[in-house]
Amino acid sequence: MNTPSATTVSRRTLLGGSALSVAACAMGGTAFAATSADPWDHAAWIVQSIKQTKFPKADFPITRFGAKPGDGHDNTAAIAAAIAAAHDAGGGRVIVPAGAWNSGAIHIRSNVNLHLEEGATIRFSRDPKDYPIVFTRWEGIELMNYSPFVYAHGQENVALTGSGTLDGQSGPDAWWSWKGPWGGTVEHGWKEGMADQRPARARLFAMAEDNVPVKERVFGEGDYLRPAFVQFYACDRVLIEGVKLRRSPFWQVHPVLCRNVVVRGIDISSHGPNNDGCDPESVDMMLIEDCTFDTGDDCIAVNSGRNADGRRLAAPSQNIVIRNCRMKEGHGGVVVGSQISGGAHHIYAERCRMDSPDLWYALRFKNNALRGGLLEHFHFRDIDVGQVSRAAIACDFNYEEGADGPFKPVLTGIVVERLKVAQATRVLDSQGLPGAPIGTLRLEDCTFDGVAKDSILKHSPQITLDRVRVNGKVVTTLA
């Protein structure tokens, strides 16, 4: 197996000439200088150092540009005209008033805040032809594919705010059946014999492994690769605040190669296939707070590119703080991986509440020897878990049957403090590989009740327990 090299990496090549540099523990050339032994000082530095969005006090209502509510009106052009006018004027808010507004893809430009007022709903078209082919990333691989419903590429100072709703109008009869076979909790519409994403997915993965140029990885009609709901790509200073997301086609909030990102107070509820809540991918300096996630996949999943494409881009996800969030249904509450070949480090989560019989894990790491990647410096504290159906914590290097690959996954430096779990099948499911054991995992002052089965420990020799109770008894080992 090959071992990843350094934690300081950079990424400076984007399609169309955009540029982005990501340096470990640094933002805008200002690095964090540790002055105390408390790792949470670094988390505080992240929150304080994120550069905020700021917009001129100028409003551009979409009705001024011909938008009309209700059925029978396509407002794609009107919304685009409002965004262009705001951008050309130096910035401001594009206002979506109360009402139901039909639209295709919306592309946000620099210095523009797309603001949905109370009672406003943007209903996105179910017709794939309303989503032009753009440069995007799909399951950790760059390609040309359908535009995300809300999209920005290479922009700065951009926002999506308000108390309104983004309705993807996805379901068994639109987008979801493209997944193919799936074992989710809702009907997704696919039946044996129907076309689905599997041939195109395999072709895309092969292209990435063969280093086919991204401009030649063109997908779209007939390929069934679903677009993301909201994707900001290679943007600086991003705010997503207050909005509700419903009925997503695929991943829901997906910032890629962005810096200075704040996701605050959003409400996500969509149980379709791969309906992850928030997927920060190769992101630096990010805050996720006061959000609610009720999803058909992971609630929050930190990623950094899949396999050869992730290693080519070599951009980790780093300096991310998650706090005061609520996780309901989903595969995992706070998850790292599995598209994690670029690595991840300095991820913090605190004061979150997780609870659902359909939530598999509270904290989860998933990787394999086809991905590789260096994962280190993870700190979690004051997480309150009602019920998870599998294990409270999972570390899995066998994810998607990738145990026999040549790229050594590294996971170390996990500290969990004051995790309280009312009901879980297991405390821990930790499975490393013979040549790549799980690294240090420390549990401090944690309580696990309602535990029905023993933990699973394979190639996991560095687990430390300090004041840990399982079913009311203090334990010093989980073996």
Image (tube, rainbow, N blue to C red):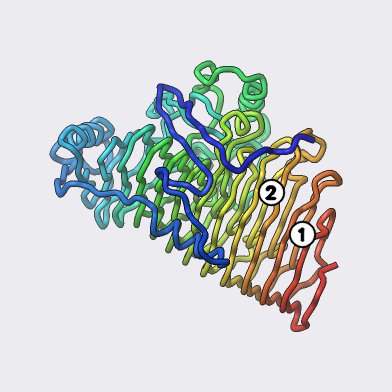
Q: Counting other residues with Cα less than 10 Å from the Cα at mark 2, is it few (<14), some (14-19), or many (20 or more)? A: many
Q: Give how far across and how far down residue 250 sits, in percent.
A: 52, 41
Q: Secondary structure at mark 1?
A: strand
Q: Which mark is residue 366?
A: 2
Above or below residue 15? Residue 248 is below
> What residue appears at the point 25 percent right and 30 percent down from the top-left corner?
77
> What residue appears at the point 18 percent right and 37 percent down from the top-left corner?
90
Left or right of residue 40, residue 366 in this image: right
Q: Give how far across and how far down residue 79 sits, in percent.
A: 24, 36
Q: Which mark is residue 339?
A: none
Q: Counting other residues with Cα less than 10 Å from the Cα at mark 1, is it few (<14), some (14-19), or many (20 or more)? A: many
In this rendering, the count of numbered labels is: 2
Q: Are marks 1 and 2 in contact (CB under 8 Å)?
A: no
Asked whether residue 117 appears in the rendered view, the answer is yes
Write down the residue under mark 1: 429
Toward which corner of the image does residue 402 lie, by quadrant?
A: top right
Above or below residue 282? Residue 205 is above
Find the distance from the CA under tag 1 to the CA under tag 2.
11 Å
Q: Give how far across and how far down residue 221 sits, in percent.
A: 50, 22
Q: Nearer the viewer, residue 156 or 116?
A: 156
